[in-house]
Amino acid sequence: MTSLGRWLLGALPGALLVSSFLACGGPSERSCAAEAPWSGTCKLKSVVKIRHAELPVPHGIFEVIYEPQSNPSSPNFTPPALREEIRVLANQELELDDYFKKHETAPCQMAAPPQGTCQPGKVSIALPPFQPTGATAAQEVHGCAQIESQATQDKLPELSKNAQQMPEVMLFEQASAVAGAEVTQAAAAAAQRMKTSPGIECVAVVGQVSPGEHPSVANERAKAVRELLLKNGIDASRVTIVAVTAAVYGGGTEAPPPDPQKRRVTLRILLSR
């Protein structure tokens, strides 16, 4: 097997190497009348990095291809190659390299094709789970910790700007970060929404200010709403604070007029599964 090199990465939190693949490409030489299932051995052809991503944690995406080998029991047909994309982390690269070296071949099989078609059936390969020891489950990051590294802190405002916004909007009084009754009720409703949607992993609590207010108020408002979410049973790992203060600056020499609708906190979903 060609060496995978030191740029191979280990499985992302919660993302294990799959043990089944979809057939890629068109059918091999095969008669439409040959509708029996196929079983045999698959051999690793290649592992290629196709792209890199920084979020939620730095990782690479790799294309893995296994090729079914000719089988004496089915001399006129061999299934097409098996292809799958996997995500892997940097601290597991050597272990993943070893994993593929140990599993250059593996049993595989193809189900009978759908009745009345000439397309190959679903192909699966019997690979054991990739279980790295260099990054155990206890070391995996969850919730907002996936994007709260120092390298991404300056990106949070932009990330929240483009993220899906939850319906609750919490308005505050001029120059105040005190949560009134309406803010408290809205925070409780948002917390209930998060409780019933465990797939929401990270929510940005976005504090804003109106022109004329001190920029620090944005952060204080976000902190106040975060505390309400925690009091309503939301785990602290699922929320992060973002302060947006651009509204206090105008395009000219004078600040724009006050806008009560900007004295607010909104909630934006940064990570979900």
Image (cartoon, rainbow, N blue to C red):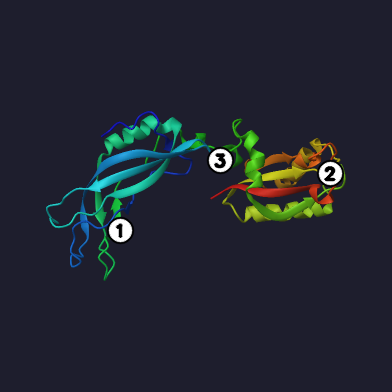
Per the image, label 1 sits on a secondary structure element best described as loop
Helix, strand or loop at mark 3: loop
Closer to the chain start, of discs 3 and 1, is 1
Residue 249 in the figure: left or right of residue 160: right
Residue 26 location, quadrant: bottom left
Question: Gap between marks 2 and 1, in whole Å?
Answer: 62 Å
Res. 26 visible in picture: yes
Residue density around tag 3, few if under 14, some if 14–19, many if 20 or more, within 10 Å: some
- For the point 80% across and 43% down, the residue is 209
Between discs 2 and 1, the one toward the N terminus: 1
Q: Are marks 2 and 3 in contact (CB under 8 Å)?
A: no
Instruction: Indicate the amino acid at tag 3.
Output: His
Contact between labelled residues 1 and 2, with CB atoms less than 8 Å apart: no
Q: Position of residue 20 (x, y in %)?
A: 33, 51
Observer-nearest of 167 and 53: 53
Q: Quadrant of residue 189?
A: bottom right
- The amino acid type found where label 2 is placed reads Pro
Give the mark toward the camera: 3 or 1.
1
Q: Pointer 1: what residue?
A: 122
Quarter of the N terminus within the rendering: top left
Residue 37 percent across, percent down from the top left: 22, 60
The alpha-carbon separation of the residues under discs 2 and 3 comes to: 40 Å
Q: Which of the pair 192/69 is nearer the observer?
A: 69
Q: Position of residue 70 (x, y in %)?
A: 16, 50
The residue singled out by tag 3 in the image is 142
Disc 2 target residue: 256
